[in-house]
Amino acid sequence: MFWFGNRAQALCKKGELPDFVCEYLQKNKSGSTRQNIAEARLVVFDTETTGLNWKQDRVISIGAIALRAGRIEVEDSLEVLLHNESSGNKESIPVHQILSRELRDGLSEAEALRFFLDYVGNSVLVAHFIEFDRQIMSQMMLRHFGLPLQNPCLDTIQLAKRLEQGFQARHDQQPGLYNLDALCARYQIPISVRHNAAGDALATARLLQILLRKAQKRGIHTLRDLLR
């Protein structure tokens, strides 16, 4: 990541990357994990994609919502649809609830990234099984700008396991207990919409609220402690 960041900084100095990418890089260069969690902006996001292979599939929608001081800020949210000619077929519509005509009128990848990077800045990115969302978004950034996501990241699956089972929890232990539906049921979190980027981001944000309260009771107060 440092190599990509340094290379991108050099390209910014030459004027070979868009201003919004350079601003994003600068913001993340000065970010600090010493910040108190209560003072930090956490952005919970989710992607809907054409498949589950982050190396070859594409993002068709992004939903994101911010938390500050444990409060979900509905007014501080983002939802974008990306242009795609083939993903709104009859089989996939019941899953992600996006029609073909909506995808045909969606943003290009570069346009969607401009909105996303401007929105997230240097916030901590949070998702449920964040590795997939991080990788597929990074692949999109690499295609267009030659660098992956730079933000610190937090996975609500791993945070839930850590708080419930401790650091020694096995990653493969009872995986069904830690999918989003199971955790929402366990913590009595209402889910209005699933398999929709904005709906999944909101459900994950509600889960994060509960996990952050549990973390605070365990003496976890800084981003550095949270991201361990």
Image (tube, helix red, strand yellow):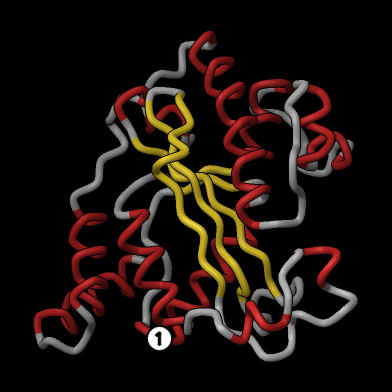
Taking the image as shown, residue 24 lies to the left or right of residue 37, namely left
Q: Is residue 26 above or below residue 219?
A: below
Q: Which residue is mark 1?
A: 144
Taking the image as shown, residue 17 lies to the left or right of residue 166, namely left
Residue 216 position in % (x across, y down): 49, 14
Number of residues whose C-alpha sits closer than 10 Å to that of mark 1, classed few (under 14), some (14–19) or many (20 or more): few
Residue 90 position in % (x across, y down): 88, 79
Foreground: 209 or 101? 101
Amino acid type at image mark 1 = His
**Quadrant in which the N terminus appears:** bottom left
Q: Which residue appears at 35% of the width and 72% of the height? A: 114
Q: Which residue appears at 33% of the width and 74% of the height? A: 4
Seen as rendered, the residue at the extreme left is 13
Residue 181 position in % (x across, y down): 82, 39
Quick one: SS at disc 1?
Answer: helix
Q: Is residue 193 above or below residue 33?
A: below
Q: Which residue appears at 30% of the width and 61% of the height? A: 118
Residue 89 found in image quarter: bottom right
Residue 133 position in % (x across, y down): 60, 61
